[in-house]
Image: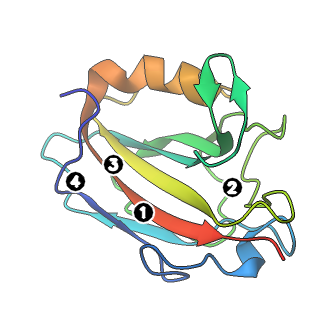
Amino acid sequence: MGFALSDMQLTSSAFKPGAAIPKRHTGEAEDVSPPLAWRNAPEGTRSFAVICHDPDAPLIKDDNYGFVHWVLYNIPASVTALEEGSNGFTQGSNDFGSAGYGGPMPPPGHGVHHYFFWVFALDQELALESGLSQPQLLAKIEPHVLGMNRLVGTYQRT
């Protein structure tokens, strides 16, 4: 299938689509990942991956734009939600240079940024090694993507 939106839906009880992400889930406060839930995964789904990316960040690294806040994968097909502050499964590396979730924290005065939380349904359990960057993960999962969708939240630093 490649990277195309599907009927799968991604939601959060912490914020509505297009709405502000609560400060609790940002680098200005507790910095815990928001709760996420998905449904309508395509038939044949064997695992999931999740990414959070800010395309509004004025950065270019390794031919990629924006800033990666979270890379999470090797999530079994039986899982359809992540609790707030989830640190289970396999953590990739974010652009803060660490593993796990690093919440929104755009530069002061930089305006509203949009944070894309993506869920990918995969046709295999890939057992990928920890520490993959977003580009590395995307390269490995692309042939296995059955469906994907996103939830976009916003944040503006005061």
Badge 4 element:
loop
Q: Which residue is mark 2?
A: 87
Amino acid residing under circle 2: Asn
Badge 2 element:
loop
Determine which quarter of the picture holds residue 40: bottom left
Q: CA distance from mark 4 to mark 3?
A: 9 Å
Q: Which residue is mark 4?
A: 41
Sooner in the amino-acid sequence: mark 2 or mark 1: 2
Q: Quadrant of the C terminus?
A: bottom right
Q: Which residue is mark 1?
A: 151
Determine which quarter of the picture holds residue 78: bottom left
Q: Do callouts 1 and 4 mark residues in contact (Cβ within 8 Å)?
A: no
Circle 3 or circle 1, nearest the eye: 1
Q: CA distance from mark 4 to mark 2?
A: 22 Å
In the shown orientation, is residue 54 left or right of residue 131? left
Q: Which residue is mark 3?
A: 77
x 17%, y 28%: residue: 1
Q: Position of residue 4 (x, y in %)?
A: 23, 38
Q: Do callouts 3 and 1 mark residues in contact (Cβ within 8 Å)?
A: no
Answer yes or no: is residue 21 visible: yes
Q: Do callouts 4 and 3 mark residues in contact (Cβ within 8 Å)?
A: yes
